[in-house]
Image (cartoon, grey):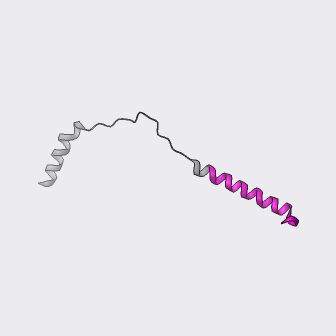
Amino acid sequence: MRLAGVACATVALGGCITVNAPEEAIVIELNVNIRQEVIYRLAEDANDAIEDNADIF
């Protein structure tokens, strides 16, 4: 009985529900990945500099 009531309510409200696309574009920021790549490259360059100039460290 309860299931029938839910089904009837769903059918009755089915025409009232509308889905609209947002007016502004959805923005996905990927700053984290770019930052990690820059830090990785800097760390690699620092290791190379330390190996090349081991006498000053």
Rendered-image quadrant of the N terminus: bottom left
Which residue corresponds to the image point at 66% horizontal and 52% vertical from the top-left? Answer: 37
Residue in view at x 20 percent, y 44 percent: 10
Toward the viewer: 18 or 51?
51
For residue 30, side relative to residue 7 (left or right): right
- In the picture, measured across the screen, residue 44 lies left or right of residue 2, that is right
Q: x and y percent of residue 26 in the render?
A: 46, 40
| Residue found at the very far left of the displayed protein | 1
Point out the residue furthest to the top here.
Answer: 23
The picture places residue 45, in percent across and down from the top left corner, at 77, 56
Residue appearing at x 18%, y 47% in the figure? 7
How far from the left and from the top, in percent, is residue 39?
Answer: 67, 55
Question: Is residue 35 in the magenta section?
Answer: yes
Q: Position of residue 40 (x, y in %)?
A: 69, 56
In the image as oriented, which residue stretches furthest toward the right? Answer: 55
* On screen, residue 33 above or below 21: below
Please report the residue visible at 72 percent of the width from the left and 58 percent of the height from the top. Answer: 43
Say left or right for 20 vs 51: left
Q: Quadrant of the C terminus?
A: bottom right
Q: Magenta stretch containing residue 46, yes or no?
A: yes
Q: Is residue 9 left or right of residue 31?
A: left
Range drawn in magenta: 34-57
Identify the main secondary structure in magenta. helix
Please say if 19 is above or below 1.
above
Number of marks in the rendered image: 0
